[in-house]
Image: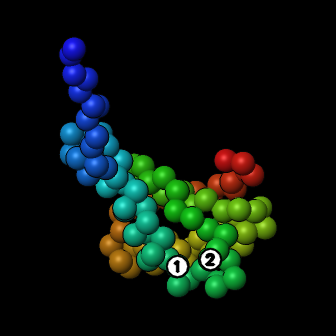
Amino acid sequence: MPTRQSPSVFSLQEAVGAAPGLAELQARIRQSQRCLDLVRERIPHALRTQVTAGPLQDAEWCLLVRSSAAAAKLRQLLPALRDALHESGAQVSAIRIKVQTPGR
């Protein structure tokens, strides 16, 4: 009776190492989170739970927010957020704000 081989199981690190596209994606995710860490102090404390790091592509960074009210306040803070990124040397030329719809 032939034996069945179990499917190979890879860790996330192994999968990323085997796929250059995944490695690039993982690097962009880390860079986006770093940008959020750099601007966090300039976001009012009550608003911080409403904001998450979104995609970073071609020097354009997206902040994801949970409500249109939070988005409106963040739009007022964009100059300060850009300053924080530039002061730290982050290569971000534009910041977009996107309201997340429920269920996404």
Identify which residue is drawn at 66% across, 62% down. Answer: 65
What is the number of callouts on the image? 2
70 vs 6: above or below = below
* Residue situated in front as seen by the camera: 102 or 62: 102
Report the residue marked by disc 2.
48
Report the residue marked by disc 1.
40
- Identified by mark 1, the residue type is Arg
37 vs 5: above or below = below
14 vs 69: above or below = above
Farthest residue to the right: give it.
69
Q: Mark 2 Cα within 10 Å, few/some/many (few <14, many 20+)?
A: some
Determine the image quadrant of residue 27.
Answer: bottom left
Point out residue 35 in the picture as x, y percentages from the top left corner.
43, 69
Identify which residue is drawn at 52% across, 56% down. Answer: 54
Identify which residue is drawn at 36% across, 68% down. Answer: 90
Kindly state the secondary structure of the residue where label 1 is placed: helix
Evaluate if marks 2 and 1 touch, with contact meaning CB atoms under 8 Å apart: yes
* Residue situated in front as seen by the camera: 20 or 12: 12
Query: For the residues marked 2 and 1, what is the alpha-carbon distance in whole angstroms?
Result: 7 Å
Point out residue 42 in the picture as x, y percentages from the top left corner.
56, 83
Kindly state the secondary structure of the residue where label 2 is placed: helix
Report if residue 83 is visible in the image: no
- Side of 33 where 50 appears, left or right: right
